[in-house]
Image (cartoon, rainbow, N blue to C red):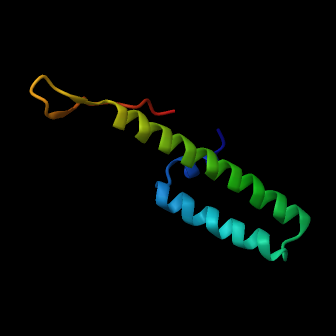
Amino acid sequence: MSANEGKKADLSYEDAVKRLEEIVNLLEKGEASLEQSLDLFKEGMALAKVCEQQLAEMEEEITRLQINAEGKLEEEAVEFPNE
């Protein structure tokens, strides 16, 4: 993983989505050179992967919620490995 990819992994979900929106807007304008467009596309793909991973982790955590014997919602602590 490059240093730039590591920085993307540290972004919050909201910040990653905001940057993805910026990239989409830049690409839709069509004002970037081919090389710049390719770089933006690569960055966008990396951000999309980060968002997908974060959502998968959240989904896994949600599925860990269980109903206990008394019928109350009980949360089982889940720790995710740092990759």
Return the residue nearer the eye: 80 or 58.
58
In the rendered image, the vertical position of residue 9 relative to residue 59, given as above or below: below
The furthest residue to the top: 69
**Residue 74 at least partly seen:** yes
Q: Which residue is more in the foreground, 76 or 41?
A: 76
- State whether residue 4 appears in this view: no
Residue found at the very far right of the displayed protein: 34
State the image coordinates of residue 21 (x, y, percent, origin top left).
63, 67
Decide: is 32 above or below 56: below
x and y percent of residue 73 in the render? 18, 35
* Image position, residue 80 (x, y; %): 40, 31
Number of numbered tags placed on the structure image? 0
Residue 53 vertical position relative to residue 27 in the rendered view, above or below = above
Q: Residue at x 77, y 57 (%)?
A: 41
x 52%, y 33%: residue: 83
- Residue drawn at (70%, 72%), measured in percent from left and top? 25
Pick whichever, 39 or 69, lies toward us: 69
Residue 57 x %, y %: 45, 37
- Where is the N terminus found, in terms of image quarters? top right
Instruction: Tell me if 40 is positioned left or right of 21 in this view.
Output: right
Residue at (84, 74) in percent of width and height: 30
